Amino acid sequence: MNQQIRDALRQEFEGMRATGARRQDLSLHACKRLFFDLGIRPSVTTVRDLTQTGSASDIPRDIDAFWETVRSTLRVRIEAGDIPETLRERAGELIAELFAEARLQAHAALEENRARLDETARSTQSAARDAEIRCEAIQQAHERSEARAEAAAAQIAALEAELRTLRTRDTHAHADLRDAIARLEADNKALSERVKRDESEAARLRDRIDELQSELRRNTEHYAQQIKDAVKDAERRVKPMLVELDALRGMAATYQASTREAGQKEFEFIQQLSAARSRADRLESQMREQSDEIDALTRERDAHRVRAGLSAEVGRLIASLALDGRLCASEIATLGAQVDAYVNAPVDCPACESAEPDLQRHEDEYELSCPHCERTSGATSSKLAAVKAFLEAADSPAPDAM
């Protein structure tokens, strides 16, 4: 079953469903169309595909009902004569099979004729399409020919109009040419008369030029003599000035030599000054290093003096008492820097535990601070006081947490 027949059957079932047909009616009609019209044995899949309704258990019951109807319709009962019931049923089934076979043969012949007619229709349709294509091509060619003819007619009209315009222009040009020739002839006559006047004027001017040239020669000779006299007078006056100029040039050369010598001396002085500055920088750096060494030695000396005046056990005991908070601020101030040698700065900040506190000394003041959390002991008089103040600051909450 091709797609065209399947689509036609589906439209037919859609119409029946729109009129309110039930599932049994749709299935029975599908079985009739498949078996009697198309010669196809009805199946669950085929009936379900055409009717688009029914379950897997309902459609088989509908197909069985169709076969029962066919058997009951085709069963022929022969009442004449004394024929056994079994024989009558077999005879009816035989007649039914003959009828079914006849329908199948008729259906096959119908399908053959239908296929032949379909082939004829397809060839006819193909020929009609070819004819339509040729007709469209002829129509397009005709339209193009008409368009070309219209374009040619328009072009001819434009050329004719242009020809008329050119003829009009030619007439006007001839008229203008005649007027121009007349004007040129008049101008030529006037120019001829003017040339004659100019030639007479030129002759008069040539005579005047000859007179002026003779006068120019006389003036030139006179002026040349005056120039020679002026040159002699100038040479007589310029000689002392040249001598003075040579003297000035010698003085300028002497001044330039002295200037170059002064520049050389200045450059040497700058080099000496630069060397002195670098030496002074080195001496200053050495002085700083020696000052740092003297400070370190002074602190070490103070520590030795403290250790010499105070035993290590007593110093450590006093430092631990102070750090444990058993000594008040006045007592720590009284001790001063005597036990600083026995006081160790904390390795990690007790508050943030992520950085090592930095102990700084400014002259006689100590300050212990954390570079990470920025807690500080403030300026104190001893290392012991700085460590105790820093520990107290670490125990207190941070300023931004309040």
Image: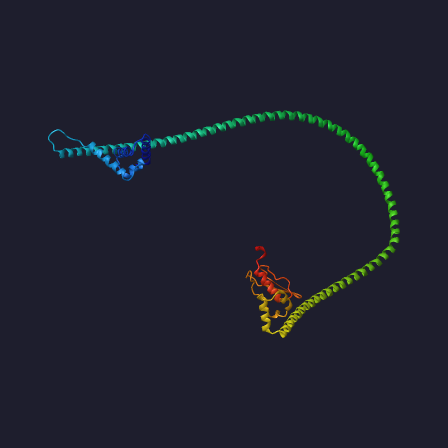
Is residue 256 toward the left or the right of residue 300 in the image?
right
Q: Quadrant of the N terminus?
A: top left
Residue 372 in picture, x, y percent from top left: 58, 59
Residue 306 percent coordinates (x, y):
63, 72
Outermost residue toward the left in this view: 82
Residue 217 x, y percent position in the rendering: 85, 43
Locate residue 215 relative to residue 35 in the image: left or right.
right
Left or right of 113, for residue 203: right
Residue occupying the point 43% across, 29% down: 138
Q: Quadrant of residue 244?
A: bottom right
Whether residue 43 is visible here, answered yes or no, is no
Q: In the rendered picture of this protein, how many numbered marks are placed on residues?
A: 0
In the visual, does 249 lie left or right of 53?
right
The quadrant of the image that shows the C terminus is bottom right
Closer-to-camera residue (126/58): 58
Q: 263 above or below 211?
A: below
Residue shown at the point (75%, 64%) measured from the top left:
269
Protein image colouring? rainbow
Rendering quarter of residue 309 = bottom right
Give above or below for 313 relative to 33: below
Q: Which sits in the foreground, 306 or 172?
A: 306
Q: Residue 365 placed where, x, y %?
A: 65, 65
Q: Is residue 92 visible?
A: yes
- Nearest to the observer: residue 359 or residue 167: 359
- Looking at the rendering, which quadrant does residue 401 occupy? bottom right
